[in-house]
Each structure stands twice: as C-alpha cells, then as structure tokens.
Image: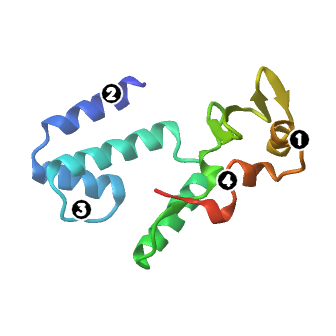
Amino acid sequence: MSRKLEEALAALVTMSPAQLRGEWLQTFGRAAPPLGPRLLALAIAYRLQEKAKGGLPAKLAREIDAMIRQLDKGVDIRASASATLRPGTQLIREWHGSTHKVLILDGAYLYRDERYGSLSDVARRITGAHWSGPRFFGLTKAAEVPV
C-alpha cells in the first residue's frame, strides 16, 4: 500500500463527523448520506482504496446491481451458481451412498486426482450415464441458492 493511501486511511479514524462529511463531499462529489461516522469512514476508505488499486470486476459489479434491483422489487436475492464457481471451490454430491468431491480449477475440474474438462465428464464418470454436470451438481438456474 502506498504511503499516501496509508496516511489518508489513518486520518479517517481521527476525523469528526463534520470532517467526515466534508471528506465524503470531496471523495464522492456529493453530500454525504445520513450515516453514522463509522459507516462514512468505511465507505470513504473503500473508495480511496478502490481508486488506488482498482474496483470490482465488471461482471461482479453487474451481478451486485442485479441483486439490488431484485431487492428493490421485493424479490428474494439470488446469486447465480456461476458466481460461486471460482478456482478452489469444492462441489460435493452424494450418489448411491457415496460422497463425491470435485475441486474447481482454472479451466478444469479435479475429481479423485484426475483432471476433467467439464462437469458433465465428471458426472458421467460418477454415474456411468450421460448427465448434465451442472444439473447433476445442482448448479442449474432452477437450483439457484438464496443469498
């Protein structure tokens, strides 16, 4: 972290509510919302770090916006299954009394120490029949999980 960013973040802790509102105006270009000093400081700190290091990936920002629209409509907020399938994610499925674990890798899937190119290949290996891998592991759109 740059020295300038460290100093700006440290200064937020010592600011009065009025100073934080002024800092908000300078940082965001508009008047501060009616939030307590702690939340103002956290939001300002996030924006400063975002400016210094970059923001959220566009895909994630769009997904968050979609969730906000769902919330505004009074709909249950749901994350797409693909939002959670990052390298390092582990999928677990019980099938005929056995537990099957798949580790998500960059561009591949690891099942019982073997790499597979798709979840469908893994599902086929487990069941011996043609299956949609995302469906077998409960990742289809109909199986979205409430956040």
Inter-mark Cα distance, 2 to 4: 41 Å
Q: Earlier in the sequence, mark 1 or mark 4?
A: 1
Residue projecting furthest to the front: 97
Residue depicted at 53% across the width and 67% down the height = 66
Q: Residue at x 74, y 55 (%)?
A: 135
Residue at the image point whose x is 41% and y is 76% from the top: 72
Above or below, comparing residue 33 to residue 133 in the picture: below
Residue 101 sits in quarter: top right
Q: Amino acid at mark 3?
A: Ala
Question: Percent position (x, y) of residue 91?
Answer: 64, 38
- The three-letter code of the residue at mark 2 reads Glu
Q: Which residue is mark 2?
A: 6
Quadrant including the N terminus: top left
Q: Closer to us: mark 2 or mark 4?
A: 4
Are the residues at dot 1 and dot 4 in contact (C-beta closer than 8 Å)? no
Which of disc 1 and disc 3 is earlier in sequence? 3
Q: Residues within 10 Å of mark 4 (few under 14, many from 20)?
A: some
Question: Which residue was labeled with disc 4?
Answer: 139
- Which residue corresponds to mark 3? 32
Residue 128 badge:
1
Indicate the secondary structure of the residue bearing disc 1: loop
* Label 2 environment density (alpha carbons within 10 Å; few <14, some 14–19, many ≥20): few
Q: Position of residue 40 (x, y in %)?
A: 23, 51
* Kind of residue indicated by mark 4: Leu
